[in-house]
C-alpha cells in the first residue's frame, strides 16, 4: 500500500504548529494527545522541527531539522531529548509501529 516514508506527526518551533497526518485520525484521542504533547514539548525545549516518520518496513523514526544557522536550536539537547523519548515512550512507540504494520501494511500479528 505504502512504498515510501509516511509522516505520522510533527511539530515546528518556527511556525509554532503541530501536524497529525489525517490518515491516523482513527487513533484513540489519548494517543493523539500524547503525540501532540511529546512533539510540541520537544520543539519548545530544543527548537527546530521534529517529525515522526514511518520507514517502508514500519519502523517509526524521529527526524529532526532546523533552519540554517539557527542559534536557538540545541543539537546536543536534541539528541539527548530523542534518547529520553525513546526510553520513556518506548511502549507508545512500539504500539504505533504495530498499529502501522497491521492497519497500513496489512501484516498479521
Image (cartoon, rainbow, N blue to C red):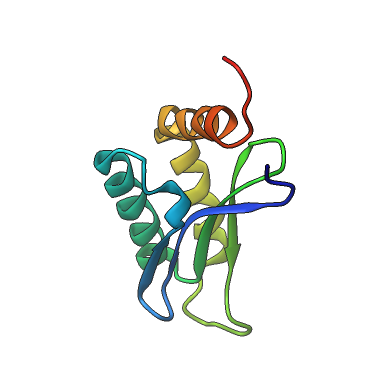
Could you tell me residue 102's position as x and y percent? 55, 27
Residue located at (74% from left, 47% from top) = 3
Residue located at (56% from left, 60% from top) = 76
Could you tell me residue 18's position as x and y percent? 37, 66
Q: In this view, does 43 lie to the left or right of 62?
A: left
Identify whether 15 is placed above or below 90.
Answer: below
Front residue of this view, candidates 46 and 40: 40
Identify whether 91 is placed above or below 31.
Answer: above
Residue 70 image-quadrant placement? bottom right
Q: Exactly how many numbered labels are in the figure?
A: 0
On-image quarter of the C terminus: top right
On-image quarter of the N terminus: top right
Residue located at (57% from left, 65% from top) = 75
Residue 43 image-quadrant placement? bottom left
Q: Residue most toward the top? A: 109
Could you tell me residue 86's position as x and y percent? 49, 38
Front residue of this view, candidates 29 and 33: 29
Residue 64 image-quadrant placement? bottom right
Q: Is residue 9 left or right of residue 18?
A: right
Amino acid at each position: 500500500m505504502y512504498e515510501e516514508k509516511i509522516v505520522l506527526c510533527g511539530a515546528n518551533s518556527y511556525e509554532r504548529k503541530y501536524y497529525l497526518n489525517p490518515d491516523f485520525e482513527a487513533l484513540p484521542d489519548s494517543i493523539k494527545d500524547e503525540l501532540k504533547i511529546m512533539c510540541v514539548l520537544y520543539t519548545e525545549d530544543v527548537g527546530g522541527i521534529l517529525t515522526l516518520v514511518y520507514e517502508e518496513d514500519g519502523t517509526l523514526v524521529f527526524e529532526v531539522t532546523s533552519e540554517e544557522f539557527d542559534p536557538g536550536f540545541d543539537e546536543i539537547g536534541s539528541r539527548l531529548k530523542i534518547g529520553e523519548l525513546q526510553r520513556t515512550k518506548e511502549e507508545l512507540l512500539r504500539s504505533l509501529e504495530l498499529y502501522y504494520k497491521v492497519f497500513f501494511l496489512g501484516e498479521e500479528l
